[in-house]
Amino acid sequence: MPPAVRSDASDTASGRRAAAQRHRVRQDLAAAAMQLFATQGYEATTVDEIAAKAGVARRTFFRHFRSKEEAIFPDHDDTLVRVQAVLDSADPREHPLDTVCRGITEVLRMYAQVPEVSVERYRLTREVPTLREREIASVARYERLFTRYLLGHFDEGAQHDGDDDPLLAEVAASAVVAAHNHVLRRWLRADGKGDVEAQLDHAFDVIKDTFGTGIGAGRIPTKAEAAPATVSRQGEVVVAVARTDASPAQILRSIEEALRRA
């Protein structure tokens, strides 16, 4: 048993070293690509030149990237894995919109880790349509991930007319990504200066005020919250009970349903 344990530990250490080496090569290639794009232009730069500047062979370049435009976005794949991990490990009692906000914060941290690189990349993507399209495609992957996550908190087979939760889930996912993009662009235009996470937190507060109380799935409700709308007669008075975090639209539906049952 002890030798097996040592072997497992050795395999784990080896895996970490391999991952670190892969990360270094990808970063070197990305830095080389950005330098060449900035000095001689995107169209004039070849994969061979990027590989040579990074000190690796052409085949090494293609082990890490499929194209030269992909080379200046080296971290999106790894970040997507981290974001998925945030969603997968979320406490079931956490509001799903809070979880999504934590997930996209990982994306922001990717950009904020090396501000000067992100600022230069932003400049390049604004000048080169191919790079801009590539970044848009990368951002769309996060939006799809968040939309699936939020929709996964609803039983779509049980939906009925007047239930806005699926609509709110898709719109909220788009809003979280849009808020991130807005804050990120503003920070990049300011040359990466300022507390960008604080700015994103403020944007999240705006989104939660708009959508958060309207999405009640994904939480373990309290006994009082779980109670369905009820009605009792007191003369001509109808009393309806709704969750304390319900949106105005949900409260109105509860009242309407209570009146129909009265």
Image (cartoon, rainbow, N blue to C red):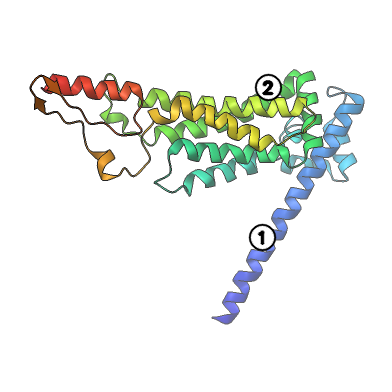
Is residue 123 depicted above or below 86 in this figure? above
In the visual, does 72 lie left or right of 260? right
Is residue 52 depicted above or below 212 in this figure? below
Distance between mark 1 and mark 2 Cα atoms: 33 Å
Residue type beneath disc 1: Gly
Secondary structure of the residue carrying tag 2 is helix
Dot 2 alpha-carbon crowd within 10 angstroms: few under 14, some 14 to 19, many 20 or more: some
Farthest residue, direction right: 39
Specify the label residue 113 is tagged with: none
Q: Point out the image quarter for the N terminus.
A: bottom right
Residue depicted at x 45% and y 33%: 148
Residue depicted at x 43% and y 49%: 91
Is residue 174 depicted above or below 63 in this figure? above
Dividing the picture into quadrants, the one containing residue 139 is top right
Residue 162's x, y, as percent?
29, 19
Dot 1 alpha-carbon crowd within 10 angstroms: few under 14, some 14 to 19, many 20 or more: few
Secondary structure of the residue carrying tag 1 is helix
Residue depicted at x 28% and y 20%: 252
Specify the label residue 133 is tagged with: 2
Residue 261's x, y, as percent?
12, 23
Viewer-side residue, 140 vs 15: 140
- Asked whether the residues under the numbered discs 1 and 2 touch, taking CB atoms below 8 Å apart as contact, a structural biologist would say no
Residue 3's x, y, as percent?
60, 80
Residue type beneath disc 2: Glu
Q: Which residue is labeled 1 in the image? A: 15
